[in-house]
Image (cartoon, rainbow, N blue to C red):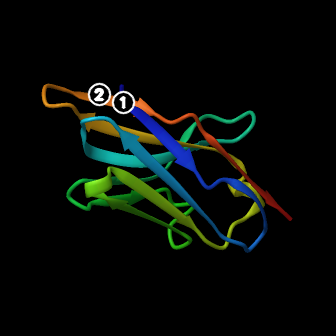
Amino acid sequence: QVQLVESGGGLVQAGGSLRLSCAASGSVSSIAMGWYRQAPGKQRELVAVIASTGTINYADSVRGRFTISRDNAKNTVYLQMNSLKPDDTAVYYCNADLFNGREINRYWGQGTQVTVSS
């Protein structure tokens, strides 16, 4: 069974850093992996996504502060978050398009809380 397992959330002061990780289990290869976030009372929004080719897309609000990277061999995606702001407080969800040899399916992680205090 395919699962996305996230780690790395927590509480940090403004200006601090956190690193999120997300690993896909199962016999799959990743097509694209990324991170979304959802703050209380707001819609889920894209933070960053990276394709297997290395193409990257960032939300304007995080560009220059966050860095997404991936290890294709481990089907793992990382999000290095620097210069964190209180507005970055949200539940962060890993997202992946995974190919199982027959079809591509989209998966979501369980979410990890990131809280930035002022």
* In the depicted structure, whether residue 89 falls above or below residue 14: above
Q: Quadrant of residue 103?
A: top left
Disc 1 or disc 2, which is closer to the eye?
1
Query: Toward the viewer: 19 or 37?
Result: 19
The residue to which callout 2 is attached is 105
Q: Position of residue 6 (x, y in %)?
A: 54, 45
Q: Are the residues tagged 1 and 2 within 8 Å (C-beta)?
A: yes
Q: Is residue 85 left or right of residue 79?
A: right
Q: Residue at x 72, y 72 (%)?
A: 16
Which element is circle 1 on?
A: loop
Q: Quadrant of residue 105?
A: top left
Q: Position of residue 77 (x, y in %)?
A: 41, 55
Q: Residue at x 73, y 74 (%)?
A: 15
Q: Position of residue 75 (x, y in %)?
A: 32, 50
Quarter of the picture holding the N terminus = top left
- The amino acid on which the numbered mark 2 sits, given as a three-letter code, is Asn
Q: Quadrant of residue 28?
A: top left
Q: Earlier in the sequence, mark 1 or mark 2?
A: 1
* In the depicted structure, whether residue 29 falls above or below residue 78: above
Q: Residue at x 42, y 33 (%)?
A: 3
Instruction: Tell me how far mark 1 sits from mark 2, CA to CA.
Output: 10 Å
- The amino acid on which the numbered mark 1 sits, given as a three-letter code, is Val
Q: Which mark is residue 27?
A: none
Q: Residue at x 37, y 57 (%)?
A: 57
Query: Toward the viewer: 59 or 108?
Result: 108
Which element is circle 2 on?
A: strand
Q: Residue furthest right?
A: 118
Other-residue count near label 1 (Cα within 10 Å), few / some / many at <14 / 14–19 / ≥20: few
Query: Toward the viewer: 18 or 38?
Result: 18
The residue to which callout 1 is attached is 2
Quarter of the picture holding the C terminus = bottom right
Q: Count the marks.
A: 2
